[in-house]
Image (spheres, rainbow, N blue to C red):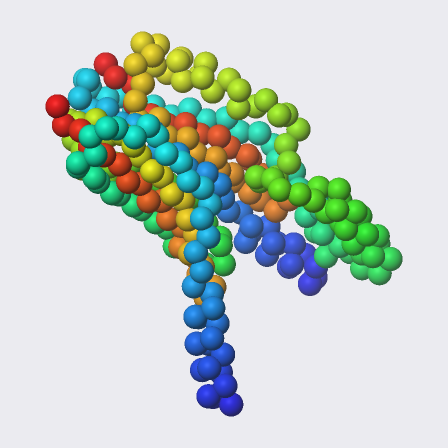
Amino acid sequence: MRQYFALAAVGLLTACARLDHVQIGEINQSQGTLIPFTVQVSEFGFEAAAAAELGRVASTGKTSQHFQEIRDILALMNMGPRTGNPVYAEDYAEKMVEYIYAECPSGKLTGLTSVREAKALGPVSGEIVRISGYCIL
Amino acid sequence: MFKKIIVSIITCLSLNACVSLNSVSLTQVPAERNNTITASSHSWNFLGIAFSNDFVDVAIMELKRQCAGGKLTGILTKHQTTAYFLVFKREVIATGYCQQD
């Protein structure tokens, strides 16, 4: 019972928004009417060590010990500087420019704001790149 | 006993009020740097648990408001987190130069 409570608590408490990076670009309000737009891409992120930790909490005895060993190995394998959870596609943010031009075909852009964020739920997360800005009419 | 608890709480409070700088960015800086404007927005959370990053948009709207009809360049954007005792303040601070034609 205790394990399920711990799992539920971890799941609920980690359902959070993470903000990694914000960059606000130049805003030109002198060239015409500004129409706001937002484009974003999200990729599935997975923290394997955290999943193993959940397994450790949810199990007992030998199984729990094995989960702990797996967790430690996975943590060592993924050690090092990084932003957010690892993802399985490295190029998921490369089509942002195409998406922006689809929103603003004239290409007259201003106030581009780049945000790197994530919505995390336990060991899984949506690793998000969001760009908002204004299309000058 | 009570005194020890008070001392511990004060120590924790004073030691935990630390700022970490998450990211910094700067756009092209203009030659004319007369009209400096600053906007910031923040979001408080408990134990680092946040459910939205929408506070970022507030800073952008504030920048737009302060430079209505003008061109805002040389924007320095800082994203920082201040840790207090169990409570965190996430903050976006933007400073730029407004050029009115």
Where residue A3 sits in the image (x, y, percent)?
A: 70, 59
Quarter of the image where one finds residue B64: top left
Determine whether, in the image, residue B89 is placed left or right of residue A63. Answer: left
Q: Nearer the viewer, residue A46 or B35?
A: B35
Determine whether, in the image, residue A115 is placed left or right of residue A75. Answer: left
B3 vs A14: above or below: below
Looking at the image, the residue that sits furthest to the front is: B31
Quarter of the image where one finds residue A92: top right
Can residue A111 be seen here? The reply is yes
Residue visible at 80% across and 56% down? A64
Determine whether, in the image, residue A97 is placed left or right of residue A62. Answer: left
Determine whether, in the image, residue A87 is placed left or right of residue B81. Answer: right
Residue visible at 83% across and 57% down? A65
Where residue B69 sits in the image (x, y, percent)?
A: 15, 26
Can residue B45 be seen here? The reply is no
Where residue A17 sits in the image (x, y, percent)?
A: 48, 44
Where residue A112 sits in the image (x, y, percent)?
A: 35, 26
Residue visible at 47% across and 20% down? A96
Q: Nearer the viewer, residue B97 or A101?
A: B97
Quarter of the image where one finds residue B36: top left
